Amino acid sequence: MTFDTRVDATGKRVLTFDCYGTLIDWETGILDLVRPWLAAAGRSDIPEDLVLTAFALHQARHQQTRPALLYPEVLSRTWGDVQATFGLPDDPAQRAAFAASVGDWPPFPDTVAALRRLAGHFALAILSNVDEASLARSLRLLEVPFILTVTAERVGSYKPGARHFETAINDLAAQGYAKESILHVAQSRHHDVDPASRFGIPTVWVDRRHGKRGTGATIANTAVPLARVPSMRAFADAVCV
């Protein structure tokens, strides 16, 4: 699949975004946190991509079996499972730090500038698999206003479940934005491109992991987006014309 230098945003008035992996660099945030823990345990030999893969699989299991579980508890249980996967000692302090780390994960270097450009052309919204408090911390880093945020805490479900998209469609309609005016922008084909397509919402895949092996902190999926871009900067270049 090639990158698209032009994206057909005709008739689109609102952009809905996944946050973590798309706007926020959660893989860097996660690895920067756990790298010293692995070193202290004498396990710097564990490949970082394998840590991210284990994270993705264990997180998905907790999210889908306990959809009402708040995201910090998902993270705590997920890191406990990663510890067990690699034979690391159970460390409650690490699990607590991992659970509280979301607001410290950094935006991608191009995110804020791209959002500022996009805000001059579209209304912006976020559909995220986290809790309200964690997202609030990240929103301060993004620096632009969003007309709507839909969290897993609010809907009692995690993407790729349908409730994020059902809620966004209804709430945006109440603000005067028809479903046909929505373009969804996300990094994860599993969490976002696939379910959005089931609602007839076109998606732009921000392929943040292009050139890297595997799917990192997300689950593999072959859903086909409307367009594929390598970054938020490239997306802004494609639609801010």
Image (spheres, rainbow, N blue to C red):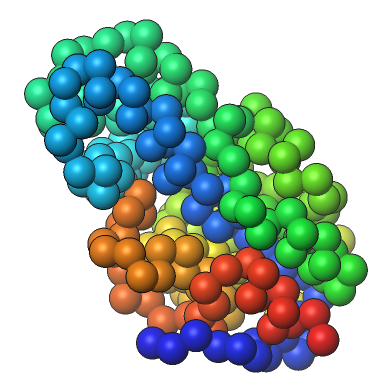
Q: Residue at x 72, y 40 (%)?
A: 141
Q: How many marks?
A: 0
Q: Residue at x 42, y 14 (%)?
A: 96
| 97 in relation to 196, above or below | above
- x, y percent for residue 32: 43, 33
Q: Residue at x 13, y 30 (%)?
A: 86
Residue 233: tell me if it is visible: yes
- x, y percent for residue 118: 80, 68
Q: Quadrant of the C terminus?
A: bottom right
- x, y percent for residue 206: 53, 69
| 100 in relation to 198, above or below | above
Tell me where residue 66 sits by quadrant: top left
Residue 200: tell me if it is visible: no
Image-based side of 202 in relation to 70, left or right: right
Residue at the left extreme of this rendering: 87
Residue nearer the viewer, 132 or 6: 6
Q: Residue at x 25, y 25 (%)?
A: 38
Image-based side of 217 in relation to 181, left or right: left
Image-based side of 189 in relation to 102, left or right: left
Q: Quadrant of the N terminus?
A: bottom left
| 153 in relation to 2, above or below | above
- x, y percent for residue 167: 64, 55
Residue nearer the viewer, 201 or 91: 91
| 210 in relation to 125, above or below | below
